[in-house]
Amino acid sequence: MAQKQINYGTVAGDGTGDILFTSFESINDNFNELYLNNVVRVNGVSDFPTPAADVITLTADTTYFISGSIDIGNDRFDTSAGNITLRGLNPNIDKITTTTTGALFTGASIRCRDIGVTVTGGDVFAMTGLGVIVLDGFFVFGCVNLGTVNATGLFVWRNSNATAITTSGLLFSGACRSLTIQSVSMSNFEGTALDFGTSTFSLLRLDGNRLSGNVGSTTLALAADSANILDGEGWITNNLFNGDGTAATGASSADEAITYHDNFGLANSFRGGDGHVLGNGTATTISTISTPVQVDFAAGFIADLESSFTVGTDGCFTYTGDTPQNIEASATVYGDSASGTNVSYRFYFAKNDIVAVGSVAQEQYDSSDPHSTAVFHIDQLVNGDKICLWVENITNTVNITVETASIRVVGI
């Protein structure tokens, strides 16, 4: 359990803090955790249990508070006893250094919070079994490999940093259950940072990470065709792949069990298109009142972004993704009626040349008063579907010139 803080408000008696019941409940929870678990303050290596054959067997149901930089020499930790926590206040200050050529942590379970580690000659992990591995504010300042995780029950790594990985990152294997890696920065690594191999998960989530490898490295290795997802779902979203290596292998927008969305540097994982036209002088011809036609951009529309979409010079967006995609389309148009005053035009989005009536945006235009109109639409697309901007004149047959337009279609 993380420490529970009591909200005592901004100033005394302002009524914004926790009520007494909630406050004392937090106090009891904090004390219960301290009394249920042994707490050891580690100021030096001698505060750990005595090692045997270079192995420090950590005591079950114990929290070790790391204070400062602790060099454990050639030793490493055995966490097999279970329910063990290593904790500090600042991972840049409260950290552990070892020269072991093995793995710093072995066992099935470990919790590390706000500590840093350096393993100059070996790996950080060699974990196996259906345990719980929770790393929060866990900084790796250097290692040969991040190591291996086999058949874990729960793996959570968040709000952390890892750098200077000289050979490879984490290799997962076996039937794992739940994995979450969130808000982790990995940089300056060789090999494969996150290798899921043939492992299987019920839940796999990578979200909000910054992943930057060296030349020749691979950031993410997945089994093809969503094979890493056994009976659940996966999300790979909002990640930044910006290193000099390969962003991912085995990843495909066609994967049915894994959702890819808003990943920078990972091909086709952001599904959207964006484009614009400036200074269009060609009028859209209105031949019949109250009859929508496609807006004429005179082949001057410019694509600014194409990811799972192609954007044509006619302003149409064609979906090229492999799986159905919900989208939101938006447009801002600046137009000018060819003549007259109070001429009413209606703008729409049309899918495959069929107007979506619900997307209508109506505005009156004067030949001497050009102005802007916003158009919105939500739909679902399959491969080959086309979205375009259309317009109709419901007053007369006077043409309209859309001088400027910005159109965006994004997956939601």
Image (cartoon, helix red, strand yellow):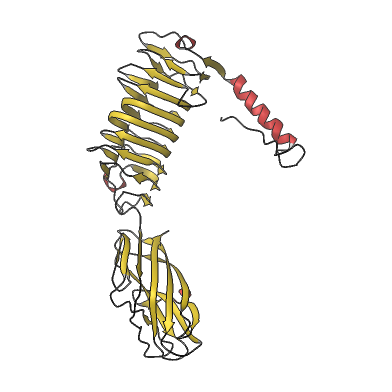
Question: Considering the image in quadrants, where does the N terminus appear?
Answer: top right
The residue sitting at 42% across, 69% down in the picture is 331
The residue sitting at 35% across, 29% down in the picture is 149
Rendered location of residue 24, percent (x, y): 71, 30
262 left or right of 16? left
Residue sitting farthest toward the left: 216
Residue sitting farthest toward the right: 13
Rendered location of residue 292, percent (x, y): 40, 83
Q: Quick check: 225 above or below 287?
A: above
- Nearest the viewer among 20 and 296 is 296
When asked about the image quadrant of residue 317, the answer is bottom left
Rendered location of residue 374, percent (x, y): 47, 72
Q: Does the image show residue 130?
A: no
260 left or right of 224? right
Q: Quick check: 115 above or below 358?
A: above
Q: Quick check: 44 above or below 403?
A: above
Q: Quick check: 81 above or below 216?
A: above
Question: Considering the image in quadrants, where does the C terminus appear?
Answer: bottom left
